[in-house]
Structure formats: structure tokens, C-alpha cells
Amino acid sequence: MTLTDPCVHCGFCLPSCASYRVLATEMDSPRGRIHALKALAAGELELDATLASHFDSCLGCYACVTACPSGVRYDQLIETLRPQLRAPGLRSPWQTQLRQWLLALLPYPQRLRALLTPLRPYAGSGLQRLARRSGLTRLFGPELAAMEQLLPALTAEAFGPDPQGLIPASGPRRARVGLVLGCVQRLFDPAVNAAAIRVLSANGIEVLIPAAQGCCGAVSHHQGEEAQTRQLAEALIKSFEAASAEPLDAVLVAASGCGHTLKAYGRLTGKSFSAPVADIQEFLNQLGLSDSFRAGLKPLRHSDGSLASAERPLAMVFHDACHMLHGQGIGHQPRQLLAAIPHIQLREAVEAGVCCGSAGIYNLVQPQEAAELGRIKAADLSTSGAELVVSANIGCSLQIREHLGLRGQPLAVLHPMQLLDWSFRGLASSPARPEPH
Ligand code: SF4
Ligand code: SF4
């Protein structure tokens, strides 16, 4: 029995498919791609540039896996095919070059820092807003314009040393974990890892962060770059082994795109961490918030500065990252953790399971489709009427911030760890509204 055999072509997966949603052609749906895979296997079809473009239009969001009543493992099917899409002639020279640049840059935080350093005065500045409004950024083509649109303000922390070493548990130690920092997250939103470390420590969890840790290989994995994925995975495992004098209870990550790949290491590389990999929300919810942490949680503030209360709770809408919900089956854990914060009201998006268009580097290599999905997601989240958006994946956060900004509704997009951290520390600051794009 092959992986395509269980597909009965019922089409139940189509409404949840992000590429079908924006392209509306059978060939850009899971059912159409499975049909093509069957024909390829039977020798009835050849993998040419046209067919390859229909596989490249797939975001790898795996909503179809969740939706399929026949248990078709489309995730495994597309993973097997992706390395073949790298064959010469299947992509345009520009698309091939663009992917090579991104894969030579994104998994290497030091290279990314070097590239971004001259952009620091521009990122998040009035000049950036002016360049965007004037349409100047579009002159560089859709892919480079998409990169510019995603570029957030770059903080000093992003260019300082990464968090590293052993961060002790506050109070009696309940667990000992390693933390994977994520390449894009440590540069574009370093406040997330800082908050995650404080929340873990305050919950009696000792945190080990190897100084020499590199990339987990998620971007390479999503692009079918098997050798690079293996190389990055092996180096990351080694860095944790070298730094751990004592066994770890788990290796955690606060970016779900990375978590999905980290959990697949055994299958992808034949090597694994000596401790199980878990998403930070998954681990913390299973362990349970400590009594002292729970007792220390205080109401957050509205964007007008007033404290949330029973009469006027702080409404937030949760965004499920695809690699968390469909890729790892994690949905209730972050919601349960957030529910511990007093006077919040958690709202749900109407189309919670549909991809926001970020999908690794999809929004850089397929900018038009990604932008359409970003617009749909931003509209869905903003109609919830919530004051802020919660997202546990850096790629989604950047994409959603961009499209909320473009709508003129620049709500704050925050990680659950940031909200728990703020609540525990009783920060006076409210979830500030970013500038519109
Ligand atoms: S993948 Fe599943 S849901 Fe989609 S057409 Fe095939 S059997 Fe139906
Ligand atoms: S992974 Fe996502 S975009 Fe790709 S076929 Fe499945 S639902 Fe559609």
C-alpha cells in the first residue's frame, strides 16, 4: 500500500486548504496534488516546471491532514516530493537563486545579523513607513518588497549576545530543560525568548541554553534540503550534548515552526536529542503552572492603560500556527495557560485552522498568494473585536503584524509567554499598539 492509496478523492480537505483558497484550481488543492502524485508514480505524468509550480504553491500547512477522514498523510507525501523540486529547470533561475540566498542566510543568525546591521536605523523608522507608503519598495520586485514588508523594528537585544548558560529555577527545582532559541525569533523578536526563560524559571524550571547553538533546520526541511537539514540537526544535537552535564527532562522551543522539525529529527536524520522535544506550551501545561506562579498572576492592562477587570476583561484572539495545530496537534495547551491570567477573554478566529500565509519562507518566495492569505487572516482576526492577537510562532507573528498594519488595524501580536510574563511581573505597560504600515 502506498501513501496515496487511502485518498478516495472525496474533497473534504479542499475547504481547509490555503493554496486552494487563493488559487481555486484543483491542481493547487491536496486532492489534485495527490492525483498528480499517483500519475507520477504510474509514469503517466512527468515532473515538469508546470507541475512543479503546483507543488510549490502548497504551503505545507497540513490543514488537509487534519481535515482528511481517510487518514491520508499528505505531510509525508509532500515531504518526499520536495527534494525533487530542486532539479534543474523546474524553477525559474530567479526562484532558484532566491531560495539559495535564503537558505544561505536564514539558518545562520550571525550572517543574518551582519546583513541586518546596516538596516537598523531604517527598520521601524519613519523612513520605512514613508518608503512603503510611496510605493518605492515595490520597485524591487514582489519578493524583495515582501521581505521589506516583513522587516520589523530591530531592537538592540537582537544584536547583543544571545541568552546562554544555565538559568536557575526560582524556588525548588521541578524540572530541567534545554531551550532552542530559533534563528528568526532570536533576531526579529528576542523578547519572546527572554519572556520564556523568565516564565520557565519562575515556574521552578532550570533552563540550559547552549552558547554555540545554531539553527534547527526547519527552513531547510520545509524546502526539501535534506543534506542541510541533517547537518544543522546534527550540529544542534551536539551543542546540547556538549553543554548538558546532567540529563534534561525535555528540549523546548517557543517557535512552533521549529518545534515541528525538531520533533521529526529521528525520522529525518536518524539522530535525536537524549531528551524528548516539546513545545514550551505543551510542556508547561503538562507540568502545570506552579502554585506560586499562578498566585502571582495579575490582570493585564488594556491599550488605554486601564487594568482589565471582571466587568471589562482584556479580549485577545488566539491564532493557531499550522505547525502547532496541524503539525503537532497542540491547541488547548496555550489556551489553558492563558486562562490562568485574571480577567482575560479568549476569543476564537472564525477560520482558526487556515494558514496565515507565512509558512516558513513561503511569504518570500510566493508573495502574491501569501499576501492574499495574510489579508484574509488579518480580516478574520480583527473582526473578533479583540484588543490583541496571541501567536506562538514567529513567522505567523511577523505576517499577521504586517497585514494588520496594512489594514490600518495595528493590533499588538504577542506570544503566550510574553503575556504570562507580563502578568506575573505586574508590568504597568499595556500591550502597545504598533505604528500602522
Ligand atoms: S486527501 Fe483525504 S479529504 Fe482530501 S480528497 Fe483525499 S481522502 Fe478526501
Ligand atoms: S499542506 Fe496546506 S496548502 Fe498544502 S495541500 Fe495541504 S492544506 Fe493545502
Image (tube, rainbow, N blue to C red):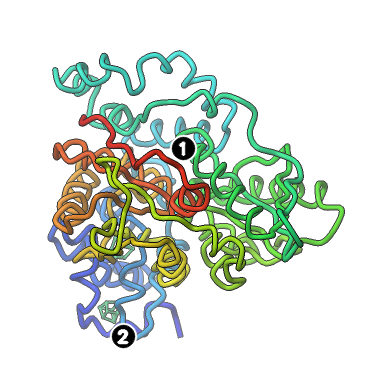
Task: Give the residue at the far right of this rendering.
Answer: 245
Q: Quadrant of residue 19?
A: bottom left
Q: How many marks?
A: 2
Which picture quadrant has residue 181?
Answer: top right
Earlier in the chain: of badge 1 and badge 2, it is 2
State which quadrant residue 75 falls in.
Answer: bottom left
- Residue at horizontal 38 percent and vertical 71 percent from the top: 74
Dot 2 falls on a residue whose secondary structure is loop
Q: Amino acid at mark 2?
A: Pro
Q: Nearer the viewer, residue 28 or 304?
A: 304
- Mark 1, residues whose alpha carbon is within 10 Å: few (<14), some, or many (≥20)? many
Residue 123: x percent and y percent? Answer: 36, 21
Labelled pair 1, 2 in contact (Cβ < 8 Å): no
Neighbourhood count class around disc 2 (C-alpha, 10 Å): few under 14, some 14–19, many 20 upward: some
Which residue is identified by label 1? 189
Relative image position of residue 144 (x, y in whole percent): 30, 27
Which secondary structure lies at badge 1? loop
Residue 403 pos. (x, y %): 22, 41
Which sits in the foreground, 337 or 283?
337
Q: Looking at the image, which residue is at 35% across and 29% down?
A: 151
Q: Which residue is mark 2?
A: 69
Q: Position of residue 278 (x, y in %)?
A: 59, 64
Q: Label 1 vs label 2: CA separation?
A: 38 Å
In the depicted structure, whether residue 70 falls above or below residue 188: below
**Which residue is nearer to you in this view: 112 or 20?**
112
Mark 2 C-beta closer than 8 Å to ligand 1 = yes
Say which quadrant the C terminus sits in.
top left
